[in-house]
C-alpha cells in the first residue's frame, strides 16, 4: 500500500485542488495555495502517485495543506476490518459479512423475475468469498469454484440455443 507524502501546509486559503491517483483510482485530494502547488505536485509524483492540479469548485474553502483521503481508496488508513477490494464498506460489522454492490442481471426487457448477483464473505479471517445470486423469492450462495463451473455450463447451454446455419431456427 502506498502512502501520501508530507505536503506543504502554510494554512493560507487554498486556490488549487490536486487530485491524487493510484493506478486508475482517485484516492485523495490535496489543497494548496498557488505558492505550494508545484512543490506538492512534485512530492506526490515522487511518491509514485499521479497528481492532477485543478481549480477549486464554487463555494469550496480549504486551507493550504488540507488533504482529504477517500475512505474506499488505496490510500485510506485501514480500519479494524480488512475489507476486500470489492466490498461496499457499508455496515459490514452489523451484517456480519462483507458485500459487494449487487449487480442486476438486466436484459433491458420485461422479465418474469428480477435477479441480482454479488460477492459476499463472512468477517472471519478464514472465510471464503462466495457468489450470491438472489431473486424475488430466494437466494443461492455459490463458492467461487461453483460459480466458475456454472459460468462454463451456462456458456455451453447458451451455445446450444444458437441459431444453426441454414435452418434459421434454434437447435
Image: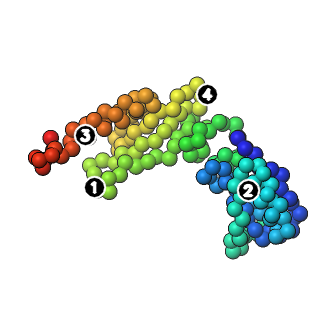
Q: What element carries label 2?
A: strand
- Looking at the image, is mark 3 or mark 4 earlier in the sequence? 4
Q: Residue 159 carries which label?
A: 3
**Residue 71 x, y percent position in the rendering:** 67, 49
Looking at the image, which residue is at 15% across and 46% down? 165
Q: Which of the two discs, 1 and 3, sits closer to the camera? A: 3
Label 1 with label 2: CB-CB less than 8 Å: no
Q: Mark 2 points at which residue?
A: 68
The residue singled out by tag 1 in the image is 110
Q: How many labels does the image show?
A: 4
Mark 1: few/some/many CA within 10 Å (<14, 14-19, 20+):
few
Circle nearer the viewer, 1 or 2? 2
At 69% across and 55% down in the image, what residue appears?
50
The residues bearing labels 2 and 4 have C-alpha atoms spaced at a distance of 30 Å
Q: Report how far apart the C-alphas of labels 1 and 3 lie in the structure.
A: 23 Å
Q: In the visual, does 85 lie left or right of 106?
A: right
Task: Tell me which numbered mark, 1 or 4, is placed earlier along the sequence.
Answer: 1
Q: In this view, does 168 lie to the left or right of 131?
A: left
Amino acid at each position: 500500500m502506498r502512502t501520501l507524502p508530507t505536503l506543504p501546509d502554510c494554512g493560507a486559503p487554498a486556490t488549487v485542488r490536486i487530485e491524487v491517483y493510484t493506478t486508475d483510482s482517485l484516492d485523495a485530494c490535496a489543497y494548496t495555495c498557488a505558492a505550494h502547488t508545484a512543490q506538492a505536485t512534485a512530492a506526490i509524483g515522487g511518491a509514485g502517485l499521479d497528481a492532477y492540479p485543478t481549480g477549486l469548485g464554487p463555494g469550496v474553502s480549504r486551507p493550504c495543506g488540507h488533504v482529504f483521503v477517500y475512505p474506499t481508496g488505496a490510500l485510506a488508513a485501514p480500519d479494524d476490518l480488512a475489507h476486500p477490494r470489492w466490498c461496499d464498506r457499508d455496515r459490514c460489522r452489523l451484517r456480519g459479512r462483507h458485500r459487494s454492490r449487487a449487480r442486476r442481471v438486466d436484459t433491458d426487457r420485461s422479465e418474469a423475475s428480477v435477479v441480482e448477483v454479488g460477492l459476499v464473505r463472512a468477517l472471519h479471517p478464514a472465510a471464503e468469498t462466495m457468489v450470491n445470486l438472489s431473486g424475488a423469492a430466494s437466494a443461492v450462495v455459490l463458492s467461487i469454484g461453483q460459480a466458475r463451473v456454472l459460468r462454463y455450463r451456462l456458456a455451453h447451454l447458451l451455445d446450444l440455443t444458437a441459431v444453426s446455419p441454414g435452418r434459421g431456427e434454434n437447435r
